[in-house]
Amino acid sequence: MKARVHVTLKPGVLDPQGRAINHALHSLGFDQVGDVRQGKFFDIDLGYEDRDAAEAAVKEMCDRLLANPVVESYAIEIDAP
Amino acid sequence: MKARVHVTLKPGVLDPQGRAINHALHSLGFDQVGDVRQGKFFDIDLGYEDRDAAEAAVKEMCDRLLANPVVESYAIEIDAP
Amino acid sequence: MKAGVIVFPASNCDRDVAVALEQSTGRPTTMVWHGETQLPALDLIVVPGGFSYGDYLRCGAIAAHSPIMREVVARARAGTPVLAICNGFQIVQEAGLLPGALLRNASQRFVCRDVHLKVERSTAPFTSRYNAGTVIRIPVAHHDGNFYADDETLAELQGEGRVVFRYVTAEGARGPAANPNGSLDDIAGICDPSGRILGMMPHPERLADAMLGGADGRAMFDAAVEHLS
Amino acid sequence: MTAAAEVTPEIVREHGLTEAEYARVLEIMGRAPNLLELGIFSVMWSEHCSYKSSKRWLKELPTKAPWVIHGPGENAGVIDIGEGLAAIFKMESHNHPSFIEPYQGAATGVGGILRDVFTMGARPVANLNALRFGSPDHPKTRHLLRGVVAGIGGYGNCVGVPTVGGEVNFHDSYNGNILVNAMTVGIAPADRIFTARASGIGNAVVYVGSKTGRDGIHGATMASAEFSEDAEEKRPTVQVGDPFTEKLLIEACLELMATDAIVAIQDMGAAGLTSSSFEMASSGGVGIALDLDRVPCRETGMTPYEMMLSESQERMLMVLAQGREAEAEAIFRKWELDFAVIGHLTDTGRMVLRFHGDTVGDLPIDPLAKASPEYDRPWVPTPPPASVEPPEAPGGLEDALRTLMGCPDIASRRWIWEQYDHTVMADTVQRPGGDAAVVRIHGSATGGRPGRGLAMTTDCTPRYCRAHPETGGAQAVAEAWRNLNAVGALPRAVTDNMNFGNPERPEVMGQFVGCIQGMKAACLALDFPVVSGNVSLYNETDGRAILPTPAIGAVGVIDDLARTASVALKRDGDILLLVGE
Ligand SMILES: Nc1ncnc2c1ncn2[C@@H]1O[C@H](COP(=O)(O)OP(=O)(O)O)[C@@H](O)[C@H]1O
């Protein structure tokens, strides 16, 4: 089984990276670009047979390690491509 | 219109971050975890009306700025949630 | 010799390298703002270290698209020597002047310490004051200095003698203990086929004055002056 | 005045004001405050901003010497270091935010102290820190240590200021309340020091730096509230640092400071726009009118309350001389920073806040900034320590030495300082690992004779302070002095960061008083004035206080760098001497 986890800054939290990328795209002439937010993602191979068990485990991984609950939120997809 | 771009290290390029996360997950007791790859993604708001135009522009953004072709590959989704 | 240093938003070794250049050239260094579209006449261009654009997106990626870089690339291709240090190395790689990429350190941590380098290539304009095989000591300070190139590129660099510096121990031995960041083939610095474009992670400008505990870096600036004056 | 949201006793309590304090609010205002005004009182009168528990004792510290240009009261202390130059330095805590989010907490701590120093006109030349963590085997310690060290490095390395020294201790009293104290040292021309003293009725009040977001609202009150295990719930109040913007802000401010366009300047630290505007107006004896519609905001729909209390980082407030706005704006635009005229100075002695055409707040300045509450809290002296016999060296001297070398408080700190860029600026003469760090005074850029240096150190031994606060306080100062001396520097002045538990408990207050008295005695004896500092109280978890930790930062001058000493043994056959008692 595979999981893909997306981690982003919570809305309202300063995203200096996204802002810098937005500026850079504009200075390259991409003037149709609006807001840019950057996040990270993890592709995780899992040994579980059971989807619910996998999902619960990944949720725990996010809470404990993959995301920083102070400033980040996350979304989990199981068996994502 | 919105685009989501995923950027990952190409297969074959060592991903020390992914490996470090794999180790950390194992030491937290998640022993069902196999390979972990880390990547980044960008959510970009776009002013285009036309999907193909948007896609072409985002492809150009990737080639010119968002991904480093020496070590990274990318995937584009238009109007991702 | 007239040397110029390119200044990007959040370059932070621009002054350091200007001071080291002035010590060797005896004349003021020209500082060039990244937003300029024209370069003055220069015998040497330095792309300095720092955190251009905060290292956001990828180290060096945004700076590589600064207006001035078009000029720097053109001059470099026309034969003006370019010394690219640390973040400067990342920038010129992103701009396509040197091959490969610099990934996150294998330790995942920033590393600041003195390293020993074996001078693998002793040629003008930058390393002619060292004998090939000499071991020198200068600092590194980076988070993303882990040199990577695909097999073909690596073979080309090796075959053409374009590896200029390798990480070694004080005694000159290679091995994981001497390599601060996991670089492929212990590579610390490479050049273009002509040797006129040099990119390196360590900072020669930070040990170019005996008062700071070492002056091995100074010979690079002296060599440039000797050849470019 | 628009219809005020009703301020209930519960809202008052949530804002951390006591009944007596609220009674004073009513007296000062002559009416009930609205929510915005209450929020302003609450941050201005928080422990963090008002020093209400500590002021009475801090006044006892010696602060004067012929070489002191500005003592406590400014953003940072300023001393004359000769050759027309001044050293500007201060230490500041970011304890609670770093416990909640170690990377960002420590990073924004470094950002804040840098701003305190460059706001006075100095180029920052070195950072130091004083860190305290819980027991090495406590489950959170590793994570906290790793995050704090990475955060300090992440910020300092990016702005390009070398982190050259610091100290670290481990003790279980810090398990639930770590200490992250950051110090910055800067150098400025002695005749071009900038202060927050606003003057010139009608002059523009200008906002520069990053935009204002909703981050850290109520951070200042949080930093003064005692911690409990549910602290985790206060998480969203943590701010994210942007060292890239800070670096641009340093360069832009220094560029503008080279002209004479700035009348007054103040960084927006804890309590952001509120404390910066009140402090500028109060120290200059003027009033301010602010037009909040002009505050650059990161998000839409922000309220005046949010704007005035936001703790978004990398922002500064300035008063410009008449007619200099365009020149200043050009510099900040070049550095891609926000610039906005958000108000002007008035002769009313009041802070008047306007938003959407209405007056949304109107407060007298001095009663908030100067006549804030001041407490003489009850205290009891710390009982004298039990005497301890020197123990037998366990298993002989060699084993004892091995045990000592492996002990977390003594073991090598290389793992830490290698993550800090300590050689950037190419002026670091003595790196971390010795008694004090030595940084060359950059002659050619700032004028002055080459070959001079500054030495700097941070020191404190909290277990001494607990055993006997007077001795511990004196010892911390003396150790700092000796560390400067040991590298060949003339010790000149001190900054401090007083980290203690809940001052409402007489034993804790007694520790505070004892440490101050010890510091005072040592500073007087050594002619070593305190020129700046910071107080962090309420460092406790569930009623258990940290060890009393008066961290001392100190700076000395080296007149000839060719004549400094270092800890490294130089040659075979050299003779080791033991001096002193
Ligand atoms: N947090 C830190 N940051 C930078 N350097 C540090 C830090 N902690 C310790 N050091 C350096 O390690 C050396 C020894 O540290 P420590 O044993 O804590 O200090 P001391 O010897 O003054 O008691 C000193 O040179 C100090 O500058």
Image (cartoon, coloured by chain):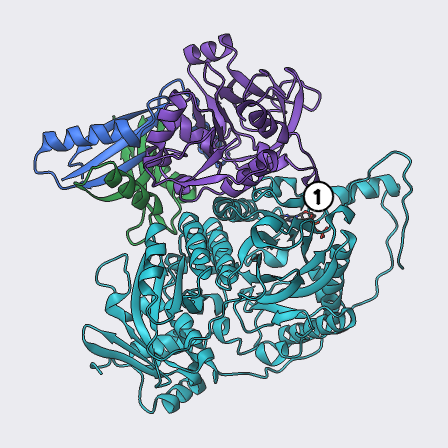
Chain colours: A green, B blue, C purple, D cyan
Image: B25 above or below C9: above
Q: At 35% across and 47% down in the image, what residue appears?
A: A16
The answer to whether mark 1 is within 8 Å of ligand 1 is no
Query: Furthest residue to the top?
Result: C159
x and y, in percent, of residue D492 in the image: 70, 64
Q: At 43% across and 85% down in the image, what residue appears?
A: D367
Q: At 50% across and 14% down in the image, what residue appears?
A: C162
x and y, in percent, of residue B72 in the image: 34, 24
Quadrant hosting residue D14: bottom left
Q: Secondary structure at mark 1?
A: loop
Image: D310 above or below D453: below
x and y, in percent, of residue D331 in the image: 36, 55
Name the foreground residue: A6 vs D530. Answer: D530
- Residue flagged by tag 1: what amino acid is it? Ala
Q: Which residue in the protein does label 1 denote? A: D411
x and y, in percent, of residue D183 in the image: 58, 57
Quadrant containing the C terminus of chain C is top right
Pointer 1 chain: D
Q: Is residue B38 visible?
A: no
| Neighbourhood count class around disc 1 (C-alpha, 10 Å): few under 14, some 14–19, many 20 upward | few
Image: D120 above or below D283: above
Q: At 18% across and 36% down in the image, what residue appears?
A: B80
Image: D209 above or below C57: below
Quadrant hosting residue D348: bottom left
